[in-house]
């Protein structure tokens, strides 16, 4: 069985995750060190670089925290944004395919660079994930709903 990643759904399966599963963009990765632009960085270029960093950082997050090589990951697909009810923090959700089998991913997870940020990774069936959504924070429930919507839209096309 090939394992499909959706970062925000992986995170609830990682027990005791210290960073709450949030990916932090690194503006310095694209040469942005302030909100002001100079002659070289136009607003459009800055926006393009920030957008690209969003997608690059989600791949880095999976590589660092799950341990899978970047070459085994497909292009991230942005599937939407969900918001927590309690503190209204928003979370961006991405879907990323991985060419590895779930057993291979579990083995790599054991030696992930940032594996210390969690204690376990679960591979679950879709029905088990759906059953577990009631125990997830609201934004992750929204992420699962976005994922299901993406799958439904793919079936229709």
Image (cartoon, grey):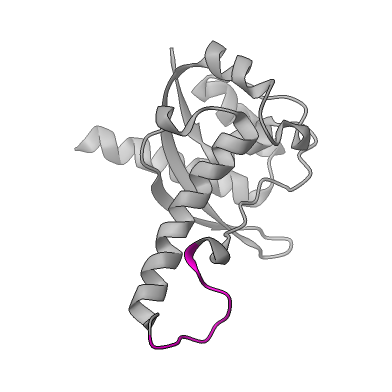
Q: Which residue is drawn at 55% across and 11% down?
A: 103
Q: Which SS does the magenta portion mostly show? A: loop
Residue nearest the observer in this picture, 142 or 96:
96
Give the side of residue 84 with respect to residue 41, left or right.
right
Range covered by the magenta-colored residues? 30-39
Image quadrant in which the C terminus is located: top left
On the image, the x and y values in percent for residue 120 come to 73, 24
Q: Which residue lies furthest to the front in this view?
A: 40
Res 80 seen here: no
Which image quadrant for residue 108? Answer: top right
Give the side of residue 52 with respect to residue 130, left or right.
left
The magenta stretch spans residue 87 = no
Give the side of residue 57 with respect to residue 115, left or right.
left
The magenta stretch spans residue 37 = yes
Q: Residue at x 41, y 66 (%)?
A: 49
On the image, the x and y values in percent for residue 138 come to 65, 50
34, above or below 98, in the image: below
């Amino acid at each position: 069985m090939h394992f499909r990643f959706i970062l925000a759904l992986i995170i609830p399966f990682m027990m005791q995750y210290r960073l709450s599963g949030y990916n932090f963009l690194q503006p310095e990765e694209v040469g942005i060190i302030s909100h002001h632009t100079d002659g070289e960085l136009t607003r459009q270029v800055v926006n393009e670089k920030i957008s690209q960093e969003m997608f690059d950082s989600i791949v880095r997050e999976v590589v660092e925290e799950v341990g899978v090589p970047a070459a085994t990951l497909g292009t991230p697909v942005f599937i939407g944004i969900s918001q927590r009810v309690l503190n209204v923090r928003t979370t961006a959700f991405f879907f990323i395919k991985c060419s590895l089998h779930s057993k291979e991913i579990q083995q790599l997870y054991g030696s992930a660079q940032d594996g210390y940020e969690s204690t376990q990774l679960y591979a679950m069936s879709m029905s088990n994930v759906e059953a577990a959504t009631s125990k997830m924070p609201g934004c992750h429930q929204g992420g699962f709903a976005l994922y299901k919507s993406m799958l439904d839209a793919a079936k229709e096309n």
